[in-house]
Image (tube, rainbow, N blue to C red):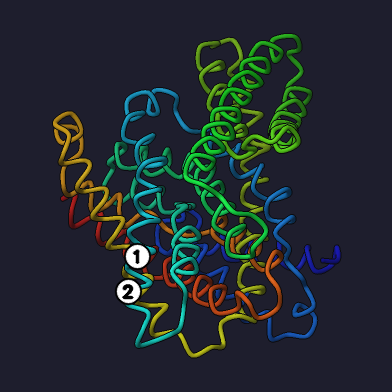
Amino acid sequence: MSASQMILLLLIGYIVFTIDKKQENFPVPVILVLCGVSLHFMPYFSSIEVTESMVYHVFLPALLFTAAYQFPAEGFRKNAGIITFLATVGIILTVALLGALIYVLSGPFVSISFLGALLIASILTPTDPVSVTSIIKSASGDMKVVEVVEGESLINDGTSIVIFSTLAGMFTGSESVSILSFFWEFLLVSLGGTLLGLALGWLMGKAVHLTHHKQYQVMLSIILAYGTFNLAEAIGVSGVLATVFAGIMLSFEYGRATREDHFREALDGFWGIAELSILSLLFLLIGVQAAKFLVFDGWGFAFIIFALALLVRFIIITTTTQLFPHWRRHISWRESVLISWSGLKGSMSVYLILSLYAQSSPGDAELIISLSFAAVLLSLGIQSLGVSPLSRKLMK
C-alpha cells in the first residue's frame, strides 16, 4: 500500500466518522467495509494486497492495547468469572457445536468436510464489538453488558488463535494433533502470554513514575503495546493475551496513582487518534480484500452459517448464565440476549481468514474463505444495525 493510497483511505475514514460524531446513529465499521468493497472496483485501489502479517503485527497490537488499557480494572474484576468462561470453555463449546451444525446442514448447499466446518466455526468465534459498545451505552446505559462484551472480546482472541492454528494445521496437513497436545499447547500459550503481559504491564506502571514528561510516557506505551506483542510471539506464547493483560495491568496501576492523571490524558489523546486511524484503514482494507472472494454461489448457506453462529452463541451464553445461580442473579436473560447479539465478527476473524489463505494451496480453501468472509460481513451489517433497537427494547 502506497503512502498516497493510505492518505486517501484515512480521508475516507475521517469523512465517515465525522458524519456520525458520537457514533450513535449508525455502525461506522459497516459503512467503512461497504466503502472498501466499492473501492475494490477502482483500479487505483484494487492493487492493494492485505496480508495476515499486516493485520496481525501492525493493526491488532494497537487496537488490543487501546481497548485493554481503557477497560476498567474494576469491571474486569466484577465480571471475571463469566468473561473467562465465555472466552475459554465457551469458545471451545462454540467451535464444536457450530462446526457440527455447519457440517450437518451443508449437504444440500455445498460440499464441505467436517474439519472444514470446524475451521469455519473457529474463524467465526472471536468477537469484535468495535463501536457497538458505545451504541449500547447510549441506548440502554447498561454498563454490565458493555463490560462483559468488551472483556470477552479482549480475551477470546487468544483462545481463538490457538484453536484455529490447530485446526488449520490439520486441514493443510502440516501437523497432526492429539487432544492432550492441544490442551497442553493451549495452557502454555495462554498462561504464558497472560503472565508475560501482567509482568510487563506492572513494570511500565512503575517505570512511568520515573519521568513526568508526558510525551516520553506515551512513547513508553507504544513500546509496551508493540514490544509486548512481538516479545510474546518470539518466545512462543500468545501475543494477543500478552498485550491485552499488559494494558489491563497498566489500567490497574495508574488507576491507583492519582498523581499521574496527566499521563492518562496524554495516553487517551494519542491512542484515541491512533485507534480511529487504524480502524478506518482496517475496515476499508477488509472491504477491499473481501470483495474478491464474495462472488460465489454459496451466499444462501453463508446466511445460514451466520444465523447458526448467532444461535449457538445465544444458546451457550443463556445456558451458562442461567445454569449457575451466581451468574443467574448477576445477568438476566435479557442481558444474555444482548450480549449474544453484540458479539460481532471483525478484525480477528479477518486475520484468521487471511492466515488460512496464506497457508493453503490455491483452491483448497477457497470455499471456506468465501463462506467465512460472507458470514463476517453479514455479522458486521445485520448485528451492528440491530444493536440499538434491540438494546432499547430489552433494557426498557
In the figure, is residue 159 to the left or right of 90?
Answer: right
Percent position (x, y) of residue 168?
59, 59
Q: Determine which residue is flagged by label 2.
A: 104
**Where residue 11 is drawn, which disc sits there?**
none
Residue 272, picture quadrant: top right
Q: Which picture quadrant has residue 244?
A: top right
Q: Quadrant of residue 188?
A: top right
Towards the viewer: 33 or 174: 174
Residue 296: x, y in percent? 53, 88
Question: Going 38% across and 54% down the picture, which residue do you hit?
Answer: 343
Residue 324 in percent (x, y) is at 17, 34
Q: Is residue 205 above or below residue 363?
A: above
Residue 148, horizontal then vertical, whole percent? 35, 39
Q: What residue do we see at 64% from left, 81% from top?
A: 292
Type of the residue with mark 1? Ala
Q: Along the line of sight, which residue is nearer the eye, 315 or 138?
A: 315
The residue lying at 66 percent from left, 11 percent from top is: 206
Judge whether 111 appears above or below 199 on screen.
below
| CA neighbours of label 2 inside 10 A, class few (<14), some (14 to 19), many (20+) | some
Mark 1 burial class by Cα count in 10 Å: few <14, some 14-19, many 20+: some
Image quadrant holding the N terminus, namely bottom right
Disc 2 versus disc 1: distance between alpha carbons? 6 Å
Dot 1 falls on a residue whose secondary structure is helix
Inspect the image, locate mark 2, and give the three-letter code of the amino acid beneath it: Val
Q: Which residue is mark 1?
A: 100
Q: Residue furthest bottom?
A: 297
| Above or below, comparing residue 179 to residue 7 in the picture | above
Q: In terms of depth relative to the viewer, which is nearer, 53 or 346? A: 53
Q: In the drawing, does residue 190 fall left or right of residue 387?
A: right
> 261 above or below 112?
above
**Mark 2 in CB contact with mark 1 (< 8 angstroms):** yes
